[in-house]
Image (cartoon, rainbow, N blue to C red):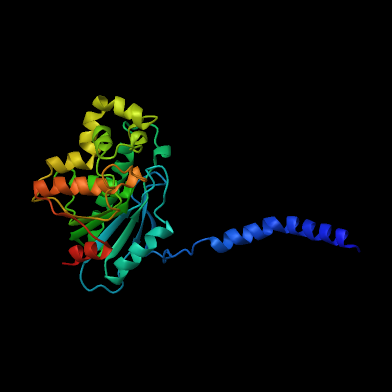
């Protein structure tokens, strides 16, 4: 075998192996998944309605001698996707279990499941309200202390938590909420003032894009009053409002375009400023801070 033939064979082998090497490199570069796995629930897929998405999973503390606080977790996903069984919820569940707090994860209909509601997000939120009320109806059976009821979730789950706890002067008696990267406004005008490159929210109200929603804002005022946390905050009695502990990024610096306008820190800071003026307890914090509020 001459040198030219040997070089050609070596090059051919390298070309054939390249996809495998590339695949191995991608596999090696994949970040480690640090999400906590979900343990077996005390009660799995408990229905609170007739639709297949209207169900919850429940984890109860073992051997609790007295009624325990309860955290109701509402998953995110822009009301388009997500699931109550997402592994990303595992660390919140683990923290609750360590603290001796019951944990409930809620499934609800997504926008793709809804064809007869105006605006579409109303059906999603109706499900979440129904799930919270269902959990409350099980307080005696599940040994829950409803005076220490907490709601939490990320993104759409954070928005939902705020809506539930601020509606009708916190009629469901929520003690504290933990919104993670929340959308605290669902008013396109307000959102654009806070975050000029805002692009999220239109689908919740049945519009094709943010600009169309913005142009039809006047047609949505009654919905904004009902489904925007800022609007609900303005009408909620501060004495009845829950403690609000937010987690999320810092606001962008003046003149700097927000890289993630859907989860901008401006949502938290603008909301906190409004809450402070109304005398509603609102601060930034972590899961441990939220659990402490429920355990006090």
17 left or right of 190? right
Q: Quadrant of the N terminus?
A: bottom right
| Residue 210 visible in the current orientation | yes
Q: Is residue 234 above or below residue 72?
A: above
Q: Is residue 62 above or below residue 111?
A: below
Q: Residue at x 18, y 56 (%)?
A: 283
Q: Is residue 210 above or below residue 178?
A: above
Q: Residue at x 33, y 62 (%)?
A: 92
| Residue 135 visible in the current orientation | no
120 left or right of 223? right
Q: State the residue in front, 31 or 222.
A: 31
Rendering coords of residue 188 (x, y %): 28, 33
Rendering coords of residue 121 (x, y %): 32, 38
144 left or right of 27? left
Rendering coords of residue 77 (x, y %): 39, 47
Q: Residue at x 16, y 43 (%)?
A: 233
Q: Is residue 135 above or below residue 221?
A: below
Quarter residue 152 falls in: bottom left
Q: State the residue in front, 32 or 292.
A: 32
């Amino acid at each position: 075998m001459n040198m030219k033939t040997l070089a050609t064979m070596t090059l051919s082998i390298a070309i054939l192996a390249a996809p495998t090497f590339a695949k191995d490199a991608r596999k090696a570069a994949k970040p480690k998944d640090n999400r906590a796995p979900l343990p077996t629930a005390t009660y799995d897929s408990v229905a609170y309605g007739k639709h297949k998405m209207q169900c919850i999973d429940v984890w109860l503390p073992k051997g609790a001698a007295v009624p325990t606080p309860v955290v109701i977790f509402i998953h995110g996903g822009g009301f388009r996707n997500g699931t109550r069984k997402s592994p990303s919820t595992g660390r919140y569940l683990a923290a609750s279990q360590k603290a001796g707090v019951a944990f409930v994860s809620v499934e609800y209909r997504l926008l793709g499941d809804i064809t007869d509601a105006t605006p579409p997000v109303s059906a999603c939120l109706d499900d979440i309200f129904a799930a919270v009320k269902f959990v409350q109806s099980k307080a005696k059976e599940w040994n829950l202390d409803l005076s220490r009821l907490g709601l939490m979730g990320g993104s759409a789950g954070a928005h939902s938590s705020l809506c539930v706890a601020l509606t009708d002067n916190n009629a469901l008696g929520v003690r504290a909420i933990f919104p993670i990267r929340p959308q605290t406004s669902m008013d396109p005008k307000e959102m654009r003032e806070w975050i000029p490159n805002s692009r999220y929210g239109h689908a919740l109200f049945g519009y094709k894009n943010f600009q169309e929603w913005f142009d039809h804002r006047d047609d949505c005022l009654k919905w904004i009053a009902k489904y925007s946390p800022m609007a609900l905050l303005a009408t909620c009695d501060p004495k009845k409002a829950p403690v609000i502990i937010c987690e999320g990024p810092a606001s962008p610096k003046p003149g700097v375009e927000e890289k993630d306008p859907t989860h901008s820190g401006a949502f938290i800071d603008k909301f906190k400023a409004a809450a402070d003026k109304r005398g509603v307890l609102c601060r930034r914090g972590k899961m441990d801070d939220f659990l402490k509020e429920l355990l006090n």
